[in-house]
Image (cartoon, helix red, strand yellow):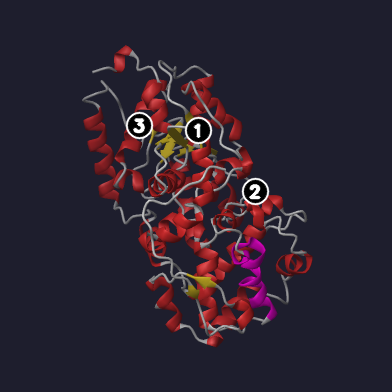
């Protein structure tokens, strides 16, 4: 999203982007606000939320994420620090794509993230970003934190109401 | 803070990464083998390094954006406490964002690009594997120096020199050749969308995953990993779109993969082509909005 929305257009010499671009969480936020999707059952286990750097620090989407989590989960625990002050998942900046040789270096750097996660006592970690999902799953496994990373689309499809006409 | 312990106990062997460097530039790290660093520096010559660094920094013309941070930084260490690598390594000062610059870009500027291949290899280690470009340090700098941008320009120099982690360079090459992250052909992409629609319809009646629908409201652009190895993301998106009753589509032509590995290694040329591909598909299909996947 970062390259498409912010970095590349000025380099291409464009004054503005030709079509509106949405992060999926901005899109889900709209769908929920407008009542296009409804939540049937909320997740009861304690959840916490990872703020992706691109969407939160650069695009300012922190409150939209919180709206989504509060709409789908009953017990939401903030990690500290949070929002734009949150630490990176250690997978960002392409670091996760450097592959297996660098996983050890990444895991060592993730100690603060693991401490931050453990402090919340949550059982589910909601991650709205692919990099975060992979990075955090590795950290949870490496530090044996006993929680599970879940993608935002997974949380929504698990909790939302499926209309009768779609049920097979 | 809660105490955490790693599951596997690795033997910690740290040694000076590049012993041939000047004393004040030596850092201690674990050895990691990556052909993207170890093999590529063998091709470098001092002339090539000097030429590349000076081309990017352009110290005669656009120097201010590189020189200003170098002359403004007072080493207050607010950026250090912002960096997860610094905190996780028991506040080892060589992981501090300011010292990451001192050990890479600022040394290149001081020496006017006259540095050794070993120095370049150490720069690659620092700029690629010890920084997430997360912008946290830039946010806390009291002078508003964009440290992250500077690290990004180190990555740009390294990319032009070809010293890039092997794994991500492959993905960048894939983007350059196919506009997708993982060498996915157009046929594979269309086929994947079609069988996913078929299978999901067994559980969700009349679900549609429309390809090439001109004039749709929304075009969805996934990441290359999704149709390749994590197809459940495509399925979930299709379910959400269908439940919400959105008029949506995916393009059939190349330029559907919204991942940008090229941006991470500052391959600006490929980065722009990937983005241009996405926008061209949007305009061709006359959609109003583009929904990405991250």
Is residue B271 in view? no
Q: Are marks 3 and 2 in contact (CB under 8 Å)?
A: no
Query: Measured from the top left, where is residue A70 in percent x and y?
Result: 52, 23
- Residue A15 circle label: 2
Q: Residue under mark 1: which chain is it in?
A: A
Q: Which residue is mark 1?
A: A48
Percent position of residue B237, x then y: 38, 32
| Structural distance between the alpha carbons of marks 3 and 1 | 21 Å
**In-image side of A108 versus B21 (left or right):** left
- Magenta segment, principal secondary structure? helix
Identify which residue, A147 or B125, lies in the foreground.
Answer: A147
Q: Chain of mark 3?
A: B
Element at badge 1?
Answer: strand
Q: Chain of mark 2?
A: A
Q: Which residue is mark 3?
A: B236
Query: Which residues are the magenta region?
Result: B93-110
Position of the N terminus of chain B, as image quadrant, is: top right
Q: Position of residue B152 (x, y in %)?
A: 58, 62
Of the residues tagged 3 and 1, which is closer to the observer?
Answer: 1
Helix, strand or loop at label 3? It is helix
């Amino acid at each position: 999203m970062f390259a498409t929305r912010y970095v590349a257009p000025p380099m291409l010499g464009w004054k503005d982007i030709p079509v509106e671009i949405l992060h999926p969480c901005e899109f889900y936020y709209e769908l929920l606000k407008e009542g296009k999707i409804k939540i049937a059952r909320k997740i009861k286990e304690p959840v916490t939320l990872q703020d992706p750097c691109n969407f939160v620090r650069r695009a300012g989407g922190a409150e939209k994420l919180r709206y989504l989590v509060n709409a789908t989960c009953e017990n939401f625990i903030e990690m500290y620090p949070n929002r734009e002050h949150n630490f990176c998942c250690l997978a960002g900046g392409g670091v996760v794509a450097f592959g297996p040789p660098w996983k050890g270096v990444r895991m060592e750097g993730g100690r603060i993230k693991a401490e931050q996660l453990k402090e919340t006592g949550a059982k589910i970690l909601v991650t709205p970003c692919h990099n975060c999902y992979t990075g955090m799953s590795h950290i949870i496994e490496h530090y044996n934190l006993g929680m599970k990373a879940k993608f935002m689309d997974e949380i929504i499809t698990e909790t939302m109401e499926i209309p009768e006409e779609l049920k097979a | 803070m809660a105490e955490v312990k790693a599951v596997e106990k690795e033997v910690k062997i740290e040694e000076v990464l590049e012993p041939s460097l000047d004393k004040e530039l030596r850092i201690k790290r674990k050895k990691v083998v990556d052909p993207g660093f170890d093999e590529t520096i063998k091709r470098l010559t001092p002339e090539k390094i000097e030429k590349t660094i000076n081309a990017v920094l352009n110290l005669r013309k656009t120097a201010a954006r590189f020189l200003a941070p170098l002359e403004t930084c007072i080493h207050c260490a607010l950026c250090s406490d912002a960096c997860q690598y610094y905190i996780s390594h028991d506040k080892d000062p060589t992981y501090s964002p300011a010292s990451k610059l001192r050990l890479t870009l600022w040394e290149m500027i001081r020496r006017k690009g006259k540095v050794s291949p070993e120095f370049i290899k150490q720069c690659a280690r620092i700029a690629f594997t010890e920084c997430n470009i997360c912008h946290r340090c830039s946010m806390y700098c009291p002078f508003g120096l964009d440290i992250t941008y500077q690290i990004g320009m180190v990555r740009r120099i390294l990319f032009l020199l070809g010293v890039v982690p092997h794994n991500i360079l492959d993905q960048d090459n894939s983007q350059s050749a196919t506009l997708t992250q993982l060498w996915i052909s157009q046929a594979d992409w269309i086929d994947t969308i079609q069988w996913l629609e078929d299978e999901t319809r067994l559980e969700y009646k009349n679900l549609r995953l429309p390809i090439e629908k001109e004039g749709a409201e929304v075009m969805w652009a996934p990441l290359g990993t999704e149709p390749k190895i994590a197809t459940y993301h495509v399925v979930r998106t299709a379910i959400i779109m269908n439940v919400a009753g959105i008029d949506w589509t995916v393009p059939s032509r190349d330029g559907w993969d919204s991942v940008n590995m090229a941006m991470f290694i500052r391959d600006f040329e490929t980065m722009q082509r990937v983005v241009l591909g996405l926008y061209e598909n949007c305009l061709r299909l006359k959609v109003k909005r583009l929904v990405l996947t991250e």
